[in-house]
Amino acid sequence: MTKIALLDYGMGNLHSAGKALSTVGAEVSITNDPKIIRAADKIVFPGVGAMRDCMAQMHEQGIDEVVQEAAFNKPVMAICVGMQALFTESLEFEHTQCLDIIPGQVKKFDALWTDEQGAPIKIRHMGWSTISG
């Protein structure tokens, strides 16, 4: 049975992801223990919230370095903020150093961005909206 470490650094959709992985036959450990993370066959790195908080929690718990090691020798599936954390840095709200596994910056979408022909790039709406009636 495949052992999957589902990273618990205090932010993330852990239980729904864990249940889905268990349903397909994985042995899932929801953990922030570096030993369990290192022993896993694969890692799932979920996340919600702000990058600054994500990186602070990972660093405080000592799992940032474990993920950096693991990313080069086992499969890592990163979801949402977890995926963003794999980049070099984030400019989400303020400059935040990330894990630097994927070279590049995470930037906020700019409503003025255009494609090669000068047409505005469509940016999908994500988040909360206020409806008034």
Image (spheres, rainbow, N blue to C red):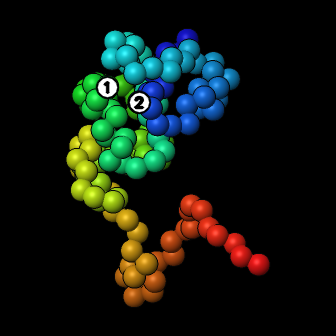
The residue positioned farthest toward the front in the image shown: 133
Quarter of the figure with residue 7: top left
What secondary structure is marked by label 2? Answer: loop
Q: Is residue 95 at all visible to an observer of this figure?
A: yes
Estimate the spatial distance between the alpha carbons at disc 2 and disc 1, rounded to whole Å: 7 Å
Q: Is residue 115 at all visible to an observer of this figure?
A: no
Mark 1, Cα crowd under 10 Å, few <14 / some 14-19 / many 20+, is some
Horizontal and vertical percent position of residue 43 = 43, 27
Q: Mark 2 and 1 residues: CB-CB less than 8 Å, in contact?
A: yes
Say which amino acid is labelled 1.
Answer: Gln
Q: Quick check: 132 left or right of 49?
A: right
Mark 2, Cα crowd under 10 Å, few <14 / some 14-19 / many 20+, is many
Say which amino acid is labelled 2.
Answer: Tyr
Q: Which residue is mark 2?
A: 9
Quarter of the rendering occupied by the N terminus: top right
Q: Could you say which is closer to the camera, residue 124 or residue 13?
A: 13
For the point 51% across and 75% down, the residue is 122
Q: Which residue is mark 1?
A: 61
The residue positioned farthest toward the bottom in the image shown: 118
Q: Could you say which is closer to the camera, residue 119 or residue 51?
A: 51
What secondary structure is marked by label 1? Answer: helix
Q: Quick check: 116 left or right of 17?
A: left
For the point 46% across and 47% down, the residue is 49
Determine whether 113 is above or below 3 in the image: below
Mark 2 or mark 1: name the one nearer the start of the chain. 2
